[in-house]
Amino acid sequence: MFGNRHWILIAGLGLVAAPAWADDAPAPAEVLSKLHQSNVKEVEMGKLAQKNGQSKEVKEFGKTLVTDHSAADKKVKALAKKEKVELTDEKPAMDHGDLTGADFDKKFAQSMLDDHEKDVAEVKKARDATDDAQLKALLTAVLPTLEKHQETARKLADKEKAEAK
């Protein structure tokens, strides 16, 4: 979910995993910026899943990612505006967007699982470390959705592994 120059590309799809926070109490501006960039990336991956995915489940998860991360980003933008934090709207580079079908599904599922496992941990860490009440409330609000995405991704990844046998 979070991103900076320490993002790692996962499974060649341009998906990102969350880096550890540089310190125990990240600045609200840093967290909001990372949340925004992550939401933008997840929305783009969701669109790609709808376009390039093969299975109904992958396409539906892609739609869910677009819907949920768009809604979360509205909250992030509202708090950023209130806290006078400027957010950039640059679209992420999507490597290997030419993968389609079963190849896409397999890499997408595992990447989303890896990504959301890290996202959940990082959001919890930032939520517990921040003294900013509004930021803490935002992080608390987005956590259940990320946990739901993590579980959906786990089911997709397990299905892909089972089908590969």
Image: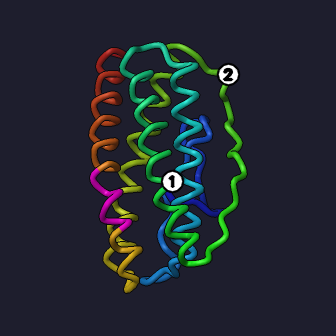
Q: Name the residue: 31% across, 60% down.
A: 141
Query: Residue 37's x, y, as percent?
Result: 59, 56
Whichever of callouts 2 and 1 sits on the residue coming sooner in the sequence is: 1
Q: Name the residue: 44% across, 21% down.
A: 59
Tell whether 88 sits left or right of 108.
right
From the image, give the main secondary structure of the stretch colored magenta.
helix
Query: For numbered disc 1, what is the local secondary structure?
Result: helix
Quadrant location of the C terminus in the rendered image: top left
Residue toward you, 70 or 105:
70
Query: Residue 38's x, y, as percent?
Result: 54, 53
Residue 90 higher or lower than 13, as above or below: below
Q: Which residue is mark 1?
A: 73
Query: Residue 127's x, y, as percent?
Result: 35, 73
The circle on residue 41 is none
**Which amino acid, by three-letter code, is at mark 1?**
Asp
Residue 91 higher or lower than 74, as above or below: above
Residue toward you, 164 or 146:
146
Indicate yes or no whether the magenta region holds residue 139: yes
Query: For numbered disc 2, what is the local secondary structure?
Result: loop
Q: Which residue is mark 2?
A: 98
Query: Residue 92's x, y, as percent?
Result: 68, 46
Quarter location, residue 148: top left
Q: Name the residue: 54% across, 74% down.
A: 82
Indicate yes or no whether the magenta region holds residue 156: no
Q: Name the residue: 40% across, 55% down.
A: 118
As measured in the structure, the alpha-carbon distance from the residue carrying label 2 to the one carrying label 1 is: 27 Å
Quarter location, residue 58: top left
Part of the protein shown in magenta = 138-144
